[in-house]
Every structure is written in structure tokens, then in C-alpha cells.
Image: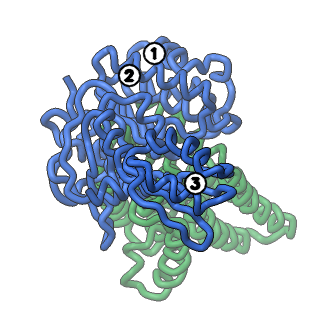
């Protein structure tokens, strides 16, 4: 039964033009990297640019943007148009539905972001260790984002708007201004991973210890998934006129 | 052996009461849930199908509350009113996915059987996005039937169907009921309910207005006072003749409109032509003044 759920979810996501457009955001990352390379920079400059491009734009913009759109659509689009009834009217444990939706969100997000991050990194300065570190960071950050946005889509019907606001306000501004909030910034968790795996080129890019970052990632992901399961168990379907 | 039991069930959304203290049992056979739009039919069906929690009272399938018991869907098929079905799937893929989500071992065979039951073989290979309303309705029914459930709940199943599809669906539901299943469907069309169901539940404004054998309810509905608007070449003469007829309760001539009230629908329609003849008036128009379903329902509620 999991396979059927998986295939419907993947097809629903890939069938949306929005999802396909998202692939272009990843392409943009690579294009910016290529343009930079064409300006024939020096080694130091290339490394600084790679950190900014992959850290700020890749992990800070592309990853959350893709995750919020995919994550809020994975279950949210079915809640919106009422097709969720065909899932709910089945003797399938609700945690299983969430597990599949989470997995698909993460896989699709990863597929759209991680390769683009890796290629952009390699193109910028040829440092494959750095590029790989950031790509893995995108995979780890994707887990946390996928869980958060999936849960959000079960809490509010305006999940996409609220999710985008969260990305811009919390991840973009607040977490940059106050040190105390950085422990709860998904981008900082991902940057810690990039620093740990990215070799010498990634030194100093993160501000959190890797152990702490991974622990918070695990806890937030688990809590968000637990919340999503709970919400799905209690989701109520009203008639169109109600 | 599958009964849906509602006991003192109410459901409100904020300040709005959608269902108000409703108690009934639905057993094997076909039961029609009749009521005007907005009467609370969908709210009732969704509570029975476990998609809504009752605000008060209990909704059970046999002895298990329907809310938060997804295992019950092994024995319940639900056909929602909303038309949205995954547009990118073919009819067959949709029914097949349902079969697999139900954990049916031979999903392909179950899919073929369900598609055959709704006679959708010809269109099964096409994407649902291109289906007509009637085809969508049938593919939804096929998906709800694929696990051969003893209980089938259908929300406005005849919406958008042409007369031939409607007859076919009625035959199918009758067949399934004859096999001992519990079938409950909602409709706002009197005639559909009359033709199909053994038992009727009439809901108006969230309350159960009447329940039981359809013939009894039909009698309640036809025996109520009826009003007709009449137009003729000589309304005054016709009014005089009509008043002499025992079946007529009241005659009103107001602003050039003749309104006749009777307690016996059939007798009046038989009496009016002879009356016109006696009055030497030509009958131009005879029109029921209040035959909308809403007026029938509101009469039932006032009783």
C-alpha cells in the first residue's frame, strides 16, 4: 500500500508546473556560478564567493524555497482540493501516510537542490570536497525543512505564505541579527554540516557545533513529524458549503 | 450485519449548528437521506464516514465510534460529493491505487471487477481530467467499491449523471442492497429517493424531520394543503364553481389572481376541468403555487 501512496504523491507533485519551475531555481544557481567563473577570479576570491553562493543563496534561498513549495504541496494540495478524502477513507495508519509524504518531500527537494548545489560548487572553484559538503548539508537541511513545512500544511491552509514568511523573516533576518536565535535556524544547522564535511575551504562558514546542529535537527524533525501525524489523525472534512 | 447508529448527534461549526440532536439507525438495504441543500446532509454523512467528529452524541458503526478509527474503512466505502479526483491518473490507475491502499492482494482483479460494476471499461484507460461529470461519479463509485465493503455511503451520487447512467447506478445499488449491504445515499431530489430507497430520512435545517417508510412520508407530503394558481377566461365564475366542490378548502381572488387551496391534490386536478365547464370558462393555466421541495420540507417540519 505504501507503493501506491508513493506513486500518487510523486505524480501529483511532478504534475504541478510549479514543481518543474523549481528545477529552474537550481539551474540559476549553476548559471551564477558559471558567470562568476568566466570572470577569471583568483583562488581566494573564488573560495569566498563559493561560500557566499552556496551558503547564502544555495542553503539560504534555494533550499528553503524548494522545500516550502514541495512540502506544503505534498499533502496541502490534496487538503485544498478535497482529494485527501481518497487517502483518508482507507484503512491506512495515519503515521504511514505522513511517513510517505515526508519521504517524498525530502527526496524531491533533495533531487532539485543537492545536485545543483554540488555542480555550482564545482563550477565556482573546482573544490569537490567543499561542493560535496554543501550538497550533503542541503540533504540534512532538507530533512528538517520537509518536516516543518509538511506539518505547517496541516496546521494552516495558508501554509505556503506563512512558510515563505518564515523563510524570509526567521531564516533570513532574525537568525542573522541575534546570536541566540541561530541555534534554531535550519540554515545554521546545514552550514554546520557543510563546515564539518567541506574540508579546509569551508572553515569558519558555520557558527554552531556539528553535534549540537545535528541534535537540534533530529529533535525538530521528529517533533514536526509527530505533530503532522497528530494533525492528520484529527483532520476534519467539511462539505463544500459548510 | 452492519448498522450505523447515531445517538443524539449534534455538530456545530463555531456558532452555526449544522446538525441538531439527531438519532437514527441505518441497517441493511437502501436508505435515502433526503433534504434541501444546506440541510446538513453532508455533515451527517461525513460524521458517519468518520471524517468529522460529532460535537455531541455518538456515531457508531456497529459498536465502534467512526471518528479516529481508520480500520473501519475496511468495511466502509465512501463516495464524496466533491468532484475533484486526481486528474492526472487514469480511471483504472485511480481504482487500482484504491485497491492497493486497501491492501487487496489481487488488486488488478479487484480493479477490473469494480470498473465492470460501474460499466466504465471503455474510458478506464483515459486520464480522469478529461472525464465528464457522470464518468467521474462512476469512477468514484468504483474506487469506493473496490474492496467489496458491506457499508456504502454516497453523497449525492446522481449529481451530473444522465438518465441512462442514473438508471444503471440505481440498478447497481439495488443489486448491492439485495446482497445484504447497508447503503445510504443523500439527495435533494424527491423522485430519486422515492425510486430507490426502502427507508427515508428527511433532514431539514439540521434536524431529522421524518424517518421511516417512504410511502408513509410520501402520504404526509401529498396530504398536506396544496395551493394552485389558476388562470381562466372568467376567474369569478370559476371561483364560484370551485367553492361548491367539497375537495376545495379555500378560494381567493386577489389582484386578478385566483388561488385555490385543497387538502387532496388528486381530487382537485380531477375536479377543476368539470368546474370550468360548468362556469363556461376556458381554463388557461393551472400551476402548483408552492411545489418547491423547500416548501414540502418546511411543511413537514411545522407538523
Question: Helix, strand, or loop for circle 3?
Answer: helix
C-alpha span from label 3 to label 2? 44 Å
- Between disc 2 and disc 1, whose residue precedes? 1
Label 1 environment density (alpha carbons within 10 Å; few <14, some 14–19, many ≥20): many
C-alpha span from label 2 to label 1? 7 Å
Inspect this view and state whether residue A72 appears: no
Q: Quadrant of the C terminus of chain A?
A: bottom left
Residue A212 picture location, percent across and down: 33, 66
Q: Name the residue beneath numbered marker 3.
A: A135
In the depicted structure, whether residue B216 falls above or below residue B120: below
Q: Nearer the viewer, mark 3 or mark 1?
A: 1
Q: Nearer the viewer, residue A35 or B243?
A: B243
C-alpha span from label 3 to label 1? 44 Å
Which chain is depicted blue? Answer: B
Q: Chain of mark 3?
A: A
Dots 3 and 1 on the same chain: no
Q: Name the residue beneath numbered marker 2.
A: B147
At horizontal 67% and vertical 18% (from top left) the residue drawn is: B122
Which label was assigned to residue B247?
none
Q: Quadrant of residue B152?
A: top left
Label 3 environment density (alpha carbons within 10 Å; few <14, some 14–19, many ≥20): many
Task: Kindly check if marks 2 and 1 are in contact, taking CB atoms under 8 A apart as contact.
Answer: yes
Task: Kindly check if marks 3 and 1 are in contact, taking CB atoms under 8 A apart as contact.
Answer: no
Which chain is depicted green? Answer: A
Residue A90 picture location, percent across and down: 36, 34
Q: Chain of mark 1?
A: B
Amino acid at each position: 500500500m505504501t507503493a501506491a501512496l508513493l506513486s500518487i504523491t510523486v505524480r501529483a507533485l511532478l504534475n504541478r508546473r510549479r514543481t518543474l519551475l523549481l528545477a529552474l531555481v537550481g539551474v540559476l544557481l549553476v548559471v551564477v556560478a558559471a558567470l562568476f567563473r568566466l570572470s577569471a577570479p583568483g583562488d581566494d576570491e573564488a573560495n569566498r564567493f563559493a561560500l557566499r553562493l552556496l551558503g547564502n543563496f544555495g542553503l539560504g534561498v534555494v533550499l528553503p524555497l524548494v522545500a516550502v513549495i514541495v512540502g506544503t504541496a505534498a499533502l496541502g494540495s490534496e487538503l485544498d482540493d478535497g482529494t485527501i478524502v481518497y487517502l483518508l477513507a482507507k484503512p491506512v495508519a495515519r503515521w504511514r501516510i505522513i511517513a510517505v509524504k515526508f519521504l517524498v518531500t525530502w527526496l524531491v527537494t533533495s533531487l532539485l537542490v543537492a545536485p545543483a548545489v554540488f555542480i555550482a560548487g564545482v563550477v565556482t572553484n573546482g573544490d569537490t570536497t567543499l561542493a560535496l559538503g554543501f550538497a550533503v548539508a542541503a540533504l540534512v537541511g532538507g530533512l528538517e525543512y520537509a518536516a516543518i513545512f509538511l506539518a505547517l500544511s496541516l496546521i494552516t491552509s495558508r501554509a505556503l505564505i506563512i512558510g515563505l514568511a518564515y523563510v524570509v523573516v526567521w531564516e533570513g533576518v532574525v537568525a542573522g541579527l541575534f546570536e541566540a536565535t541561530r541555534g534554531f535556524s535550519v540554515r545554521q544547522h546545514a552550514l554546520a554540516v557543510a563546515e564539518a564535511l567541506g574540508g579546509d575551504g569551508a572553515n569558519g562558514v558555520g557558527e554552531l557545533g556539528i553535534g549540537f546542529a545535528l541534535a537540534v535537527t533530529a529533535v525538530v524533525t521528529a517533533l514536526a513529524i509527530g505533530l503532522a501525524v497528530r494533525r492528520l489523525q484529527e483532520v476534519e472534512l467539511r462539505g463544500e458549503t459548510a | 450485519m452492519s448498522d450505523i447508529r447515531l445517538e443524539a448527534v449534534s455538530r456545530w461549526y463555531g456558532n452555526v449548528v449544522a446538525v441538531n440532536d439527531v438519532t437514527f439507525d441505518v441497517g441493511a438495504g437502501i436508505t435515502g437521506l433526503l433534504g434541501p441543500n444546506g440541510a446538513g446532509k453532508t455533515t451527517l454523512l461525513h460524521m458517519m464516514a468518520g471524517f468529522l467528529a460529532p460535537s455531541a452524541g455518538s456515531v457508531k458503526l456497529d459498536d465502534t465510534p467512526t471518528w479516529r478509527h481508520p480500520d473501519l474503512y475496511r468495511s466502509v466505502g465512501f463516495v464524496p460529493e466533491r468532484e475533484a479526483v486526481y486528474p492526472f491518473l487514469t480511471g483504472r490507475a485511480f481504482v487500482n491505487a484504491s485497491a492497493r491502499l486497501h491492501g487487496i492482494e489481487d488488486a488488478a482483479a479487484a480493479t477490473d471487477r469494480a470498473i465492470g460494476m460501474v460499466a466504465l471499461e471503455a474510458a478506464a484507460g483515459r486520464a480522469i481530467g478529461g472525464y465528464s461529470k457522470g464518468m467521474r461519479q462512476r469512477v468514484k463509485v468504483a474506487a469506493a467499491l473496490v474492496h467489496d465493503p458491506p457499508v456504502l455511503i454516497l453523497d449525492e451520487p446522481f449529481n451530473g449523471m444522465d438518465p441512462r447512467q442514473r438508471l444503471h447506478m440505481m440498478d447497481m445499488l439495488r443489486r448491492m442492497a439485495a446482497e445484504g449491504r447497508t447503503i445510504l445515499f443523500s439527495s435533494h431530489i424527491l423522485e430519486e429517493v422515492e425510486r430507490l430507497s426502502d427507508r427515508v430520512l428527511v433532514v431539514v435545517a439540521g434536524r431529522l424531520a421524518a424517518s421511516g417508510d417512504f410511502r408513509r412520508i410520501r402520504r404526509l407530503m401529498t396530504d398536506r394543503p396544496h395551493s394552485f394558481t389558476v388562470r381562466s377566461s372568467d376567474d369569478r365564475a370559476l371561483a364560484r364553481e370551485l367553492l361548491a366542490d367539497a375537495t376545495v378548502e379555500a378560494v381567493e381572488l386577489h389582484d386578478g389572481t385566483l388561488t385555490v387551496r385543497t387538502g387532496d391534490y388528486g381530487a382537485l386536478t380531477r375536479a377543476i376541468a368539470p368546474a370550468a365547464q360548468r362556469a363556461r370558462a376556458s381554463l388557461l393555466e393551472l400551476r402548483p403555487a408552492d411545489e418547491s421541495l423547500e416548501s414540502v420540507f418546511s411543511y413537514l417540519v411545522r407538523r
